[in-house]
Amino acid sequence: MESNYNKILHMWQSYDIKTAQDLDIRLNNFRVLFAYNSAKIENTEVSFHVTRDIFENAIVNDFSGNPDTITEINNQRKCYTLLLPKITTKEPLTLELIKDTHEVTTMGTYDDCRFFDLGERPGEFKKNDFVVGKDEVGSLPEHVHDDMTELLDEMNDIHELKEPKNVFKAATYFHMRFGCIHPFADGNGRVGRTMMNYFLMTHNHPPLIVYAEDSGRYYEALEYYGATEDIEPLHLFFKQQLEKTWMKTPERKRTGEKQ
């Protein structure tokens, strides 16, 4: 019996995406849900209807919360626009691309302490130590460039990526190592999830959403790796999130419902 994972993979590859317009069509609903959930994990003020308004109309009505929330979501929209054509031309992961993505994602969202007191800037690797998880600060600032270069060399040297399951596991590994390095002063989670999906799509694999409602399990898997260096819990969690992201789509396709 065909697994849900294989059903989703076959569905995605059957789209035969060639252009940015093709990809935009397939990500029409995904892009809003991804931006909403990715931001919601770290910012409880984010709402779905505000995210949808920004993506669809570039304006927001009836929002009285912190203006930084609007900036954060609008940055997600700009990031989507930045990466869409690069995905279809399969531009590889590079330090420059990751820094550009971070700059767009976090522009205007750094607090006064980070920006003025510590001299941190969107699009630049961190200059100070920041807590990653329990009793962890990630790579030292002076080691970030080399550690990120080593990680990207690993990703570009993987020779078994013709097998989709290897692509998915490699993307999981990238996300885990990116989080452990913690290369930026802020926004590492959002950029890490975005770059993981970028890697997946440039290797003809569907992206996934880490749902805010499942963030507890997400953080547990990250912390488990930190304690044991075992990637399997996060790998399993991401596979479950992939199924949660896309499983309704094959059902609609089979029954002839509009996608």
Image (cartoon, helix red, strand yellow):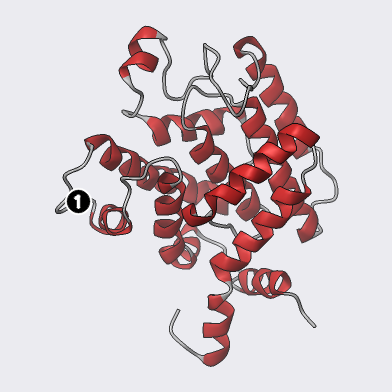
Percent position of residue 252, x then y: 52, 84
Percent position of residue 28, x then y: 42, 64
Q: Which residue is mark 1?
A: 59
Percent position of residue 250, x then y: 58, 79
Position of residue 150 in the picture relative to residue 75 (left or right): right
Q: Amino acid at mark 1?
A: Ile
SS type, badge 1: loop
Query: Above or below — where is 60 with respect to 142?
Result: below
Query: Above or below — where is 181 with respect to 104?
Result: above
Position of residue 257 in the picture relative to residue 70 (left or right): right
Q: Quadrant of residue 182?
A: top right
The quadrant of the picture occupied by the C terminus is: bottom left
Q: Residue at 63% across / 38% down in the picture?
A: 93
Percent position of residue 229, x then y: 79, 36
The quadrant of the picture occupied by the N terminus is: bottom right
Q: Quadrant of residue 242?
A: bottom right
